[in-house]
Image (spheres, rainbow, N blue to C red):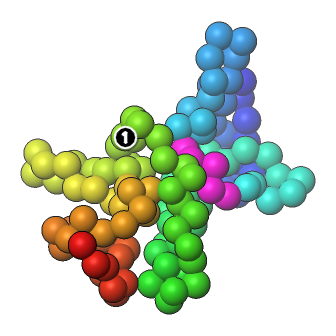
Amino acid sequence: MDKSCSNCRKAFTCGISKANTCWCNDFPPIFEVSEGADCLCPACMMVQFQLKVQEYVLALQAGQLINEATRYATPNLKEGIDFYMENGLMVLTAWFHLKRGDCCGNACRHCPYEHVNVEK
């Protein structure tokens, strides 16, 4: 089904059909599209997702958040959401660490818990 992004107005294809679900279902449901708006294109969806993750990280570091991201934990990792590839290596994102629920103590690059006192 052809749609127009409610944010940037670019045309994109929604993948929903009777046989399968749309590509947007790969994103955790951590934000809602504004009331009265239609779907977002993949690029705008990724931007909105990343902004929401940044909000979670800031709130967690400020001690204002009991890690609610753990409720979105899924067994499958999604590239661009849970990780990205760099020089052939998988780099875990802040979202992955938020879903994990605590710091592993390995000083990960995108650890959102870096300012939180973690006891092991």
Q: Quadrant of the C terminus?
A: bottom left
Q: Is residue 7 magenta?
A: no
The one of 106 and 49 positioned closer to us in this rendering: 106
Q: Residue at x 40, y 35 (%)?
A: 76
- Provide residue 11's location: percent of width, then percent of height: 66, 39
Query: At 39% from the left edge and 57% from the top edge, which residue is drawn?
Result: 100
> Which is more toward the observer, 38 or 54?
54
Residue range in magenta is 27-31
Badge 1 amino acid: Leu
Q: Is residue 96 above or below residue 109?
A: above
Tell me the quadrant of the picture where the N terminus can be found: top right
- Residue 59 appears in the rendering: yes
Residue at 30 percent across and 69 percent down: it is: 103
Q: Is residue 96 left or right of residue 92?
A: right
Residue 30 counted in the magenta span: yes
Image location (x, y in percent) of residue 71: 57, 52
Depth check: give the residue in front, 32 or 4.
32
Residue that label 1 marks:
77
Local crowd size for mark 1, using a 10 Å CA cut-off: few (<14), some (14–19), many (≥20): few
**Considering only vertical position in the picture, is 54 above or below 69?**
below
In the rendered image, residue 49, in percent from the top left (x then y), is placed at 55, 58
The furthest residue to the front: 120
